[in-house]
Image (cartoon, rainbow, N blue to C red):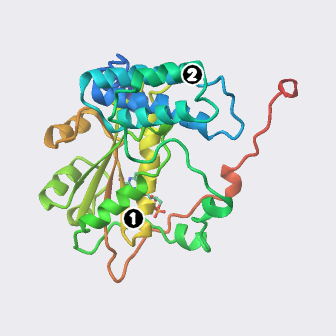
């Protein structure tokens, strides 16, 4: 009887979790499409202008395509201009639009002429590189490792660290490297909260259930989050977990490449724990916590868990059509 009740209790817990996630999505995601809101507009801007970047990058281009997207970028640019408060992607959007209408394939097009007129007095585009970039031959293969096994197989979750703070420069470097993580439409909806203050770390870890036995000695901690403002309900309600997870993994490998060890700390938490963390720290309400990350330098001698990997055949299946009639 109790066993059965406990089983259904888990389903009720799942439902409470879903409802909590739904409430947060309702409150903070972009479903109202309020383009006056700078952050929401900037996420939308990159989603739209990135289509123009893709169009510009194709070797086989259709000169008639991309114009409706260009007009959407133009509309967003006009809104940004009217607010007189431009974000990174507002500026990038204007730069990409200029690139698009000035591309040799497009510049003579009637739409290009009209757009040129509309933006001729806007001078706030970005100085950064935008649009497309040409790489020759093996340039894209510069990252190929001579010994990938040495890199990948030497990463372990380490839970006991040297009692040393990681320098700000190293942290910034790791985050910058991780920023190269792919994200949906290049939205980069990540945020990193970091502390090397013992009191803050202990308090944050008091809400997390996977640090027993080592949480007291964690010298550096991050809370990695994804911004719900970047996402629309419907198809995108899980996207922030995915993009946040990818970013987290990149950060772990970036640290690894710099000689800094880490341990992910799950944030598969109850709504009440999530709320407790939020009531204690300056985490923006629109940020969903993906995970915590303990990190630091290794001691001279370290013990790690083997954490054996499953055999490949258990996780690999060749994708095949079920019904030949579809092929
Ligand atoms: C999302 C995520 C959450 C994790 N949470 C915890 C945790 O709360 N406590 C912990 O000690 N390890 C945690 N880990 C570490 C895993 O136990 C570890 O990655 C796994 O055993 C594989 O070992 P390795 O990282 O050494 O290869 C977590 C890992 C991931 C990816």
Task: Please identify the quadrant where the C terminus is shown.
Answer: top right
Mark closer to the chain start, 1 or 2 = 2
135 vs 229: above or below = below
Task: Please identify the quadrant where the N terminus is shown.
Answer: top left
User: Residue 130 in the image: x percent, y percent?
Assistant: 47, 43
The tally of labels here is 2
Q: Is mark 2 within 8 Å of ligand 1?
A: no
User: Residue 84 in the image: x percent, y percent?
Assistant: 24, 27
Task: Name the quadrant containing residue 138.
Answer: bottom right
Front residue of this view, candidates 247 and 173: 173
User: Residue 274 in the image: x percent, y percent?
Assistant: 25, 37
Instruction: Describe the element under mark 1 as helix, strand or loop.
Output: helix
Ligand 1 quadrant assignment:
bottom left
Real-space Cα distance between discs 1 and 2? 42 Å
User: Residue 29 in the image: x percent, y percent?
Assistant: 35, 25
Circles 1 and 2, Cβ within 8 Å, touching? The answer is no
Residue at 48%, 31% in the rendered image: 97
Residue at 41%, 43% in the rendered image: 244
Residue 67, disc: 2
Front residue of this view, candidates 231 and 72: 72
Return the residue found at the far right. Answer: 325
Residue 41 visible at all: yes
Image side of residue 304 versus residue 281, left or right: right
Residue at 39%, 64% in the rendered image: 255
Residue 33, disc: none
Q: Which residue is mark 1?
A: 255
Instruction: Describe the element under mark 2 as helix, strand or loop.
Output: helix
Image side of residue 285 versus residue 7, left or right: left
307 vs 203: above or below = below
Front residue of this view, candidates 14 and 245: 245
188 vs 168: above or below = above
Residue 234 visible at all: no
């Amino acid at each position: 009887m109790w066993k059965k009740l406990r089983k259904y209790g888990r389903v009720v817990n799942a439902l409470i979790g879903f409802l909590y996630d739904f409430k947060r999505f309702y409150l903070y995601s972009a479903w109202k499409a309020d383009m006056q809101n700078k952050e929401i507009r900037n996420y939308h801007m990159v989603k739209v202008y990135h289509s123009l970047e893709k169009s510009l990058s194709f070797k086989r281009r259709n000169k008639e395509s991309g114009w409706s997207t260009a007009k959407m970028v133009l509309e967003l640019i006009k809104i940004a201009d009217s607010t007189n408060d431009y974000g990174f992607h507002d500026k990038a959007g204007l730069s990409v639009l200029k690139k698009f209408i000035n591309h040799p394939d497009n510049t003579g097009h009637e739409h290009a002429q009209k757009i040129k007129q509309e933006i001729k007095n806007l001078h706030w585009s970005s100085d950064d590189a935008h649009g497309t970039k040409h790489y020759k031959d093996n340039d894209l293969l510069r990252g190929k490792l001579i010994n990938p096994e040495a890199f990948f197989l030497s990463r372990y979750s380490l839970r006991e660290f040297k009692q040393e703070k990681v320098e700000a420069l190293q942290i910034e470097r790791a985050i910058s490297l991780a920023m190269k993580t792919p994200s949906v439409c290049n939205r980069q909806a990540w945020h990193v909260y970091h502390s090397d203050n013992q009191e803050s770390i202990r308090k944050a870890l008091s809400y997390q259930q996977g640090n027993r036995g080592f949480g007291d000695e964690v010298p550096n901690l991050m809370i990695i989050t994804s911004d719900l403002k970047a996402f629309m309900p419907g198809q995108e309600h899980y996207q922030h977990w995915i993009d946040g997870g990818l970013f987290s993994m990149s950060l772990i490998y970036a640290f690894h490449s710099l000689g800094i060890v880490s341990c992910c700390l799950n944030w598969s938490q109850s709504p009440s724990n999530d709320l407790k963390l939020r009531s204690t720290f300056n985490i923006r309400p629109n940020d969903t916590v993906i995970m915590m990350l303990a990190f630091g330098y290794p001691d001279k001698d370290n013990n790690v868990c083997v954490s054996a990997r499953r055999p490949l055949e258990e996780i690999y299946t060749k994708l095949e059509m079920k019904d030949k009639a579809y092929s």
